[in-house]
Every structure is written in structure tokens, then in C-alpha cells.
Amino acid sequence: MKKENKVLGFLRDNTVPIMFIVICAVCIPISGFSASYLMNEIVTRMGRNIFLILALLIPIMSGMGLNFGMTLGAMAGEIALIFVSDWQIWGIPGVVLAMILSIPISIVLGAFCGKILNMAKGREMITSYIISFFMNGIYQLIVLYMMGSIIPIRHFSVKLPRGYGIRNTVSLLNMRQCLDNLLAVRVAGVKIPVLTFLIIALLCLFIVWFRRTKLGQDMRAVGQDMNVARDAGINVERTRIISIVMSTVLAGFGMVIYLQNMGNIATYSSHSQIGMFCIAALLVGGASVDRASIGNVFLGVVLFHTMFIVAPKAGAQITGDSMIGEYFRVFVSYAVITLALVMYETKKRKHKSLMAQQLQQEQKEASAS
Amino acid sequence: MANAKTPLLEMRKIKKDFFGNQVLTDINLTLAEGEVLGLCGENGAGKSTLMKILFGMDVIRQTGGYEGEILLNGEKVQFNTPFDALAAGIGMVHQEFSLIPGFTATENILLNREPKKRNVISEVFGDRLDTLDYNEMTGRAEAAISKMGFSIDKNMVISEMPVGHKQFTEIARELSKDRLKLLILDEPTAVLTEKEAEALLASIRSMSEQGIAVIFITHRLQEILAVCNRVVVMRDGFVISDVPAENTTVQEISKWMVGRNVETAAKLDIRDHSAAKTIMSIKRLWVDMPGETVRDVSLDVKEGEILGIGGLAGQGKLGIPNGVMGLYEAGGTVEFDGKQIPLNSPRKCLDASLAFVSEDRRGVGLLLDETLEWNIAFPAMQVQEKFLKTYLGGLVKWRDEKAIRDVTERYIEELAIKCTGSKQKAKELSGGNQQKICLAKAFALEPKFLFVSEPTRGIDVGAKALVLEALRRFNRESGVTVVMISSELEELRSICDRIAIVSGGRIAGIRPASDPSEDFGMLMVSMVK
């Protein structure tokens, strides 16, 4: 009886990942992809995405939920890359320079976002989402009108023919996969980007270490109960801002890694969906609004991207229409986020009515004896 | 104390008022090193305010500070924030837990005072990136727990702990502060089982032996006698008595707590309704209202009477009306006028002609941003479709503005509500007048049965008398049964026919209001949990 409850509890706590495992298990054979192709794709996408998703962990730790603040970091990364490609600095030096350049931009954007989120405690997710829309407008103003006219941009491959503004697509061909290819190893036909994974491993180590620092401890305290933390003398507002700044800076690095893998910047759209997809991937890995681990990140990336790869093909095989798969993956990422939020709420309610059940039980027992 | 040493703490002529409302008058208090002082008094006697002053809580400064002086080791001190008080060696365990639910006991005990180790990164980026020294943390937590003398699992996460252990974790946190000289415990045993409470008393004794002075606030008087050196009883902002614990008894203390100087307050026209029919019968009610849990309450209310429900704070008296009216999750059965009322559904209660004036005026009672007219007419309009004009055979309903204004003006006059007119916004009124609006709102429903919860909380003496008089008239003239919940016993005695005392979530006893105050006082503390 008790064992059964445990199994049920496990199923309930992990509904989303289990659902995705089932979807993938059904779609993989239908899609007809070879194992080595599938592995290659998944490994590439892990290298591309994991760093970005790890950037989400720190705001979750400090109780700021699934935070779209990372979108701002992504914009910083893009701006940095635009400069670097204008200066024609390619390869590893270009990647490193872009990362360094993104830091001040990320810090400014992150501090701004953190300040606003401090005024909207408890509504961080939606507020940060709207901030990302607002910042997108400013980003477009800078990239479309100010770059080339006020901010010096010279290279023709980056600038629009009219003399100012950045092209729709900025090619990073000379930088493409330079991180991934350095030290890359082929195992059974699967290319493993060792350096990228090393960087990711370093970040994971950093996060594990960070949890054990004073700041990490403060963030966890603030995340669980702001009032208690404040009473203990922790500067709650400042801690929350630092947490968002750390997230945007990491997201800026993550975006540089992401784009060097892709090989081009879609100047006006790369960042717009990245927040949504990263959050969806994290949730698919079994995270919730207030709890996420490194394990959730890895599982989420594997499952989410497996679905991304196989669903269009499987959809095409079944219906003969490849659009259905495309539709399906967008639909699923929104559905996952909604589902995760609803489940989080119900869990909270259930916890609340527990006390009532206990009272009822007590009374029953008292009258029986 | 006979010794000539300067006392650890001395409070001289402390005075405090909240916007002209005097809550503390000339309080003098001394405390020697290692002394245990029991502080008792009814709700609103001023205990909490006094402790807030001592602990430098923000609320004191925000409301204009206090008069008088506090001396620590003979030196005058002024605490502007709790951190100042902590630095001076004063610790306080509040009634509400101040713990991080997902942290272990150790992490909570050392919250924001964690021992740290420097490292390369923190050299560059500042000391917030120091790593925590977990070994040292364990050591300090262990030391604090052993100092307390009650063993708790230092690695257990708070959210998984029984309530009592959470309380001990808080105490251990205070004890882990090296400089602690004085510990204030605000009703620490309220959440403890009997065994845990005994353990706490033992640990208070051991603290006292180690030279830590303790101010112990509790409603369980036997505990005070068991552990304290001295007992201080407060009432209405005065210190009523300050005696060595061995020279007094529970009876004496409870008499000091409730007895008024002017005993004329007791009501004159108490009516006996025991022959009347039972209009409401509550059976085996439990209510899950946080902080006001009700357990297994059965109660009969007679038609036409004014029944008072009294008791100390947190004992469950507020849970009864909130549970019956469906505002908090409840179970059991409630029969009204021969028909069963479904619980957990406020609308059904209103439909059955019950009305409720909530203790939460601003949250539940009023539409703060709307006019008085709306506030008074709204429930009647919603529930009984009063003040509506119907057209086209009921298809279209319009508000009858004139009827609404008339009824509002009538109540403004009857209850002497101070306002600029019936169109003023509710939030602009003072507390007492807001309370009158709440009553008018309930009166406009013309109910058969009225729950009034803490009708005089936070309002001044003049308004109090008016509110009580309005309730009495409403009952005597319209024959409406009234159940009034109040923390102030004398107020209940001045208006009610019978008074039920709730203690530990249960009914401790029901007595006619003419019984002496001490008897009610004894009931109040009889089953305190």
C-alpha cells in the first residue's frame, strides 16, 4: 500500500518529463531517423543550449521564478557579436571578445530589470516577460537606427545598404562552431564538442560551488521567505538584483555560445523566442517555478530537443504534412509552460488544505476513543 | 532584589500612545541578571507594545516613539531598530515563526551569521562570495542546542519539523548569539505539547542559571508560577502588580488580569432566554482558520439573546463565526431555524438571513474605494435584491439611487457616523466610523441573526460606547439574535446575556454575564494550548 503510494507520488511529481519520454518513445520509431543522426543532433543542441538554460537556475534559487530576464542577456550577447563581426575579429578571439563585451551591457540591463522586479514581487515571471518586450523595442531602436548613424558600424556585410541599421542576418561563418570544433572528438560517428562541454561543466561546478557561498545561501533564504531573510538582516532587494544580473550575464555568454554554433545572427528575432524555449526545456526536465536543478536542465534539453527533431518528421510521416510537426512543437512549448504553472498552483492549494484534513482526522479519532 | 548591583535592565516611566490613544502609562520594570520575569495580562493590556519598545521595533518609531528611558547595565540606551537591540544582547522569540522553511535547523540557527571561509574568488569579488564553513556551523548549532537543554535534530529541514521543534529552533537561534543577556519569549508555549512545554520550562531554568535573564510572556499561568522569580501583571497599560512568584496564586493573577477598577461596567438588564427556542445549533464544528483553530465546538444559541464569545487571542473564538459563515474551511453541522446550513458557502448563509460583521474591516468588511452609499447598500442589493428598480418584468434591474441614499442617510444619523456626506469614500473615514459602516451594512440586510466579530477593536472609547449601544438597540428593538465575539471581557459583560469562553479551540464554559470576572478569567486560561 505504502509502496504503491510512493510510485503514484513519483508519477505525479514527474508528470511532465514522463509525458515527454512517452511522446519521444512513440515519435522516434515513426520518424525513422538513424540512431547516429539523432545522437549527433542531440549532442549538438546540448552544446548549443545548456549554457543558456543554466542561466535560469539562479533567479529560481532566489525565488524570482522562471525569469525572462535572460532575454535581456541574450540581447546583450547579440549586440556584442554584432560589434565583433563588424570589427572582423573571428575565431576563438572573437568569441572571447564578444563574451567580454556582453558583460557591461548585461549588467546594465540586469540591474534595470532587477530594480523593476523588486517593485513587482510575486509577479516576477509576467513582469520580466513584459520587460523583455519593452527592451526588444529599445534593442530594435539601437540596432535598426542608431547603429551606423550614431554608433560607428563600418563593415558592409553587417550594415544595411542604406547606410545605417544592421542587416536582417549577420553571418558568423568565420566563427561558426569554432568552440565546438576545437578539441572535438568523434565517438562512433557522433561529434562531441569537448570544449563547449568543458565550459558547461565549469558553469555547473560554479553553480554547485555558488550554492555554498554566503551569497548563494542568502539567495536561497530570500527565495524561500523574503520577510524572514530581511528580519535576519539580509539586504533582500540587493540580493535579488544581484541574482538577476548574474542571470543576464550568464545568458549573454550563453547566447554567444548559441550563436557561434548556429553560425549566423537573425538580428531581429534570435532573442525573441529564446526565453520561451529555454523555460519550456527546463520545465520539461521536471523543474517547477520554485525548484530547478542541474539535472533538470540536462534531462530537459535532451527530451525537448529530441521532440523538436523527431516531431516534424513523425508528423509528416503520419499526415503527409510537415507543417503539422512544426505547429506541434510550438504548441507543445506553450502547453508545457501552462501545464507546469497550473500544477504548481494546485500543489500549493493541496498543501494548504492539508491542515483541514488533519483537524478533521483528529476530531474523528477523538470521538472514536 | 536585595543586592546593590545595578540591574541588567531598567525601564523607567515608559509611556506610549498610538495617535492619542494611551496604551502604556508610567511603566517601571527592573530585571536582574539571570532573573526570570513572568509578564501576563489580557490582550491589549500593553505587553506586546512594551516588548516592542524594548526590542526597538520599527512600528514604535513610526508611530512617534515613546517616552521614558531604558537603561541597560545602568546606561541609557535607545534602540532604533531590532538590530540595535540584538547588538546590545537582547534576543526575542516572536509568536510567529521567523524561519526559512526549506533550510535545516543549523542553517536557520545561524541565518545571516554563518561562519565563512575566504577563497580566491571572494578576494576579488568581495566577502559575499566567501564559502560557508559547514563544520563550524554544525559546531555552533550544536553548542546552541546543548545550551538550550532540549535536543532537536540539527539537520532536519524546518518544513518537516513538528511545530514545537520549530519553536525550539528559534530559541536556539537566539542562544547562538554570543552576547545574549536578555531573552524575550512571547507566548512560546502556545504551540507546544505539554511535554515540550515542560522541556521549555526546564531550558528556561538552565538559561537563567547561565546568567541569561528571561522575560516570559504566556497565558498559561501555572507555567509562570513554575518557572519565574517574579510576576508582573499588566492591565490597560498599567502595571497592576509586581510580586515574587512564590507569594501569589493562579487565582490571584487571573483576578488582577481581568478585574477592572470600576466594576460598574456589568450589564443591568440581563435577560434570561433559556426558555426561548434554539435558533442556531452548532454541532462538532472544526474550523481551519490559521492562528484561530476551532476544535469540536458544540453550541446552542437561543432566539433573541445576545451571546458573547470571549477568550484569549489565538484560542479560536474568531474561528467560530468565520467557519459558520463559510470564510474558512470548516466541518461539522450547523442548524439554523430548523434547517441545516451548508458550510463553506458564504452565499447560503446570507440567503438564510444570517449576517456577519467581520473583524477584518479593511479586508472583508468594506469596499474601501467606494462611497458610503455603496458600502451600505451593496450586500442587501446583491443578496436580497433590495434597492433595485425592475423594468420589463425583471429583465432589466437598475439601482434605486434614491432608496440607497435614504437608507444611507438614515444610518448615518442613527449611528452618528462622522462623514462629509453619503457620497464620501469609505477609506477616508476613521476606524470607529468605518466600524459603524460595517454595522450599518449588516443592519441593512435586516438579518434574523447577526455575528459581530471584534466590533470595537482599534476604536476609541467614545465610538466604542456608540457601537455597543447600536448593537444592543438592534437586538432589543428588532429582536435579532446577536453573537458577539470580543477579546475584551468587560465589553462582553456590559452587553451580553450569556458569555461563552473559548480556550484551546474548545468551549471552556458558558456563564451568565452577571458572573464575576475572575470566573471568566479562570475559564480563559483553563484549556490554553
Image (cartoon, grey):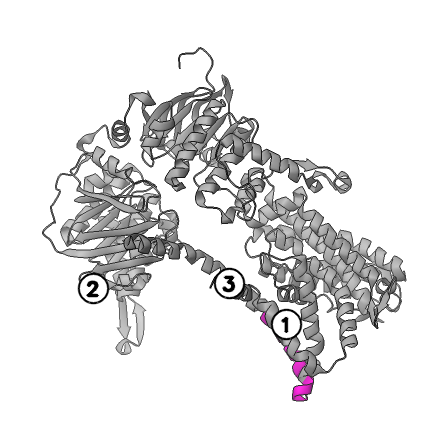
Which residue type carries mark 2?
Lys
> At which x and y percent is residue B528?
32, 40
Residue A325 inside the magenta-drawn segment: yes
The label number, if any, that marks residue B339 in the structure image: 2
Q: Secondary structure at mark 2?
A: strand
Q: Secondary structure at mark 3?
A: helix
**Label 2 neighbour load within 10 Å: few <14, some 14-19, many 20+:** few
Chain of residue at mark 3: A
Above or below, B392 relative to A234: below
In the current view of this chain or complex, which residue is farthest to the top? B4
Which residue type carries mark 3?
Lys
Which residue type carries mark 1?
Ile
How much space separates mark 3 and mark 2, taking CA atoms? 45 Å
Q: Which residues are magenta?
A: A316-336
- Foreground label between 1 and 3: 3
Label pair 3/2, CB-CB below 8 angstroms:
no
**Circle 1 residue:** A21
Q: Observer-nearest residue: B153 or A227? A: B153
Image quadrant where residue B260 sits: top left
Question: In this view of the protein, can residue B113 be seen by the observer?
Answer: no
Image quadrant where residue A154 sits: bottom right
Which residue is located at x 66 percent, y 66 percent? A281
Q: Observer-nearest residue: B483 or B204? A: B204
In the current view of this chain or complex, which residue is farthest to the left? B275
Which residue is located at x 53 percent, y 43 percent? A228
Chain of residue at mark 2: B
How much space separates mark 1 and mark 3, taking CA atoms? 23 Å
Q: Secondary structure at mark 1?
A: helix
> At which x and y percent is residue A88?
90, 62
The label number, if any, that marks residue A3 in the structure image: 3
